[in-house]
């Protein structure tokens, strides 16, 4: 008699997310910054906030925000230059801790990662116990705090890690998964950017419960190929495995402008801000690539992309911006105006997670 096949073990996923990572490292290393609103980035007129401390976030300061906007929101904001070499060193120490609990580690950036702990190799009993021990070891080894989400899939684990920040943990069991997702605003769903959230609001979709109430046909009519992801997400379903050493396809940023830009000077300034924001993400992923792609959307919504590749990897922001500006200048003049600019780096050389669909 053939023995019955054992059902697969329930997947157990932890999403670990460092709390205000860059800013927390700076506050750790400079006691004079503790308790003060801190922004990592450039304070110049065209600078961009790379990261903000929780004290700064209380004033509405966020990463990728123009520095001038951040200063208006928080006049006492203290800017410190980024030290990516230090952030990478700390990140490597944290990943070494992860490796004591599982080989299945999927880094998303320097400060967050998925861990599949279905196999309890240290015999701690539960995924929650593993997450708590990891958080304690990170605090003891680095002096920094981490938040964790523990669940049965990546989608919910990532949502959960944000639930009790900072320095918190949230555990969502399979029985609670769908209800948890449906209790949240859709703007918190990974991959739902501001533009998509606004579109959903116009359709009366504000929460996961509202999304759950829509048919797959309705979602396909309004969101195309993204519909199946949304349909499954609203039901707490995500079958994606934790993937080790998955290469990123592209990393970048784009911005839509309140008024159409027409002059070369305005467009250059705008692209520099986009490049600053993109480079923050590129550094956060710790990756390099060879192809720079410009995205340009005209006032009439005509969208073009132009790309340039180099033989070797682009390793600094100056080269990234220079290539982007060359691509932009080749499109001038634009008498009708430009409503959106984007700049990405692809042909990535690294071991990070894929970038999610662009739903800005």
Image: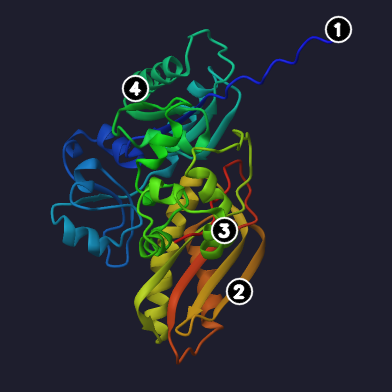
Q: Residue 36, relative to residue 161: is it above or below?
A: below
Dividing the picture into quarters, in which one does residue 227 lie?
bottom right
Secondary element type, mark 4: helix
Q: Position of residue 275 (x, y in %)?
A: 45, 64
Of the image marks 3 and 2, the number of the one nearer the N terminus: 3
Q: On the image, numbered disc 2 is attached to which residue?
A: 306
Of the image marks 2 and 4, the number of the one nearer the N terminus: 4
Few, some or many C-alpha atoms within 10 Å of disc 4 (few <14, some 14-19, many ≥20)? some
Of the image marks 4 and 1, the number of the one nearer the N terminus: 1
The tag on residue 139 is 4
Q: Which quadrant is home to the N terminus?
A: top right
Q: Nearer the viewer, mark 3 or mark 2?
A: 3
Q: Residue 209, relative to residue 336: is it above or below?
A: above
Q: On the image, numbered disc 1 is attached to which residue?
A: 1
Secondary element type, mark 1: loop
**Residue lying farthest to the right in this orientation:** 1
Question: Exactly how many numbered labels are in the figure?
Answer: 4
Of the image marks 1 and 2, the number of the one nearer the N terminus: 1
Of the image marks 4 and 3, the number of the one nearer the N terminus: 4
Few, some or many C-alpha atoms within 10 Å of disc 2 (few <14, some 14-19, many ≥20)? some
Q: Nearer the viewer, residue 87 or 52?
A: 52
Of the image marks 1 and 3, the number of the one nearer the N terminus: 1
The tag on residue 217 is 3
């Amino acid at each position: 008699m053939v023995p019955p096949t054992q059902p697969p073990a329930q997947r157990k996923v932890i999403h670990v997310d460092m709390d205000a990572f860059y800013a927390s490292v700076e506050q750790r290393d400079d006691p004079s910054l503790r308790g003060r609103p801190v922004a990592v980035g450039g304070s110049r007129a065209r600078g961009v906030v790379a990261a903000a401390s929780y004290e700064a976030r209380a004033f509405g300061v966020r990463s990728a925000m123009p520095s001038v906007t951040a200063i208006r929101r928080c006049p006492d904001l203290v800017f410190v230059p980024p030290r990516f070499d230090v952030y990478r060193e700390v990140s490597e120490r944290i990943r070494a801790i992860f490796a004591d609990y599982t080989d299945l580690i999927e880094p998303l950036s320097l400060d967050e990662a998925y861990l599949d702990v279905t196999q309890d190799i240290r015999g701690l009993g539960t995924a929650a116990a593993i997450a708590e021990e990891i958080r304690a070891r990170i605090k003891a080894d680095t002096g920094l705090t981490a938040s964790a989400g523990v669940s049965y899939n990546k989608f919910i684990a990532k949502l959960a890690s944000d639930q009790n920040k900072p320095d918190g943990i949230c555990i969502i069991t399979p029985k609670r998964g769908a209800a948890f997702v449906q209790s949240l605003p859709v703007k918190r769903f990974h991959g739902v950017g501001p533009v998509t959230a606004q579109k959903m609001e116009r359709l009366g979709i504000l929460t996961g419960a509202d999304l759950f109430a829509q048919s797959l046909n309705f979602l396909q009519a309004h969101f195309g190929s993204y519909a199946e992801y949304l349909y499954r997400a609203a039901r707490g379903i995500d079958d994606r495995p934790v993937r080790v050493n998955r290469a990123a396809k592209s990393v970048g940023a784009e911005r839509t402008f309140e008024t159409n830009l027409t002059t070369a000077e305005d467009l250059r300034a705008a692209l520099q801000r986009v490049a600053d924001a993109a480079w923050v993400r590129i550094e956060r992923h710790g990756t390099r690539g060879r192809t720079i792609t410009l995205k340009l959307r005209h006032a009439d919504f005509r969208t073009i992309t132009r790309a340039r590749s180099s033989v070797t990897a682009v390793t600094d922001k100056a080269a990234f911006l220079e290539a982007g500006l060359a691509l932009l200048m080749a499109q001038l003049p634009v008498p009708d105006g430009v409503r959106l600019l984007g700049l990405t780096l692809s042909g990535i050389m690294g071991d990070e997670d894929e970038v999610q669909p662009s739903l800005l």
